[in-house]
Image (tube, grey):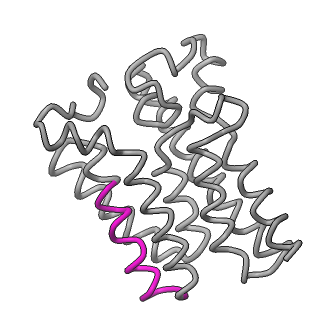
Amino acid sequence: MTDGILAALLAFLLGSIPFGLVLTKAAGLGDIRSIGSGNIGATNVLRTGNKKLAAATLLLDWLKGAAAVWLAAWLFGPQWTALAAVAAVLGHCYPPWLGFRGGKGMATALGVMLGLAWPIFVVSGLTWLAGAKLSKKSSVGSLSAAAVAPIAALIFSTPQAALGLLVVGAGVVWRHKGNIQRLLAGTEPRIGQGK
């Protein structure tokens, strides 16, 4: 049980690293939380107009999610990877250093999918790309990918991974509740625009 607590704590701490905030401040663009949606994720970083920073944020958020799962497996055993996946996404969404106000979790969720089994990442990533491209809205891609991930995990990984990604997906949907309301109202902005 101690191993599980340590795996979750390590994953939460890794997930809580606010790369979007760190990169935008280092680039002299100020506090990312003061523009757009106020979130620290890649979609909001893109609203600064700096595509390279947005791509770097996306990559680092992927990597911290994957690293959390890989480290949990290496240090504590594969039985703790699903728990680490959930904890890493929670850390991104609710970082204690930022008053528990973080991102919406999708990039880190894709990272934990990569950590659990690369085919899950591929299926969910392609689903995200298709949803975002067809709708021109990042939130549609995120919601679609979150819905597909547990099914992909059942096919390509374990029931524990599927359960972990079901919890992660529910968290991603919860964090996107404002986006869902705007989608229903027809006011959700396109990728790179507004909120």
- Indicate left or right for 107 with 176 as reference: right
Q: Count the marks: how many?
A: 0
x and y percent of residue 13 in the render? 75, 48
Task: Pick the residue in front: 131 or 184.
Answer: 184
Q: Which residues are magenta?
A: 143-158
User: Which percent across, then down, holds residue 169?
Assistant: 43, 62
Magenta segment's dominant SS is helix
Tell which residue pokes out farthest to the left in this image: 186
Locate residue 115, reporting x and y percent.
61, 69
Q: Is residue 19 left or right of residue 193?
A: right
Q: Is residue 117 positioned above or below 134 on the image? A: below
- Quarter occupied by residue 128: bottom left
Q: Is residue 15 left or right of residue 129?
A: right
Image-based side of 97 in relation to 28, left or right: right
| The C terminus lies in quadrant | top left
**102 part of magenta stretch:** no
Which quadrant holds residue 192? top left
Q: Is residue 130 above or below residue 190?
A: below
* Residue at 42% from the left image edge and 61% from the top image edge: 170
The residue shown at (22%, 40%) is 181
Q: Quadrant of the N terminus?
A: bottom right
Residue 108's place in the image compared with 138, above or below, is below
* Residue at the (50%, 48%) spot, across then down: 105
Measured from the top left, where is residue 122 in percent x and y? 42, 69
Please, is residue 4 above or below residue 173 in the view? Answer: below
Front in this rendered view, residue 20 or 185: 185
Instruction: Please identify the residue farthest to the right as the structure is shown.
Output: 2
Residue at point 65%, 29% (across, down): 99
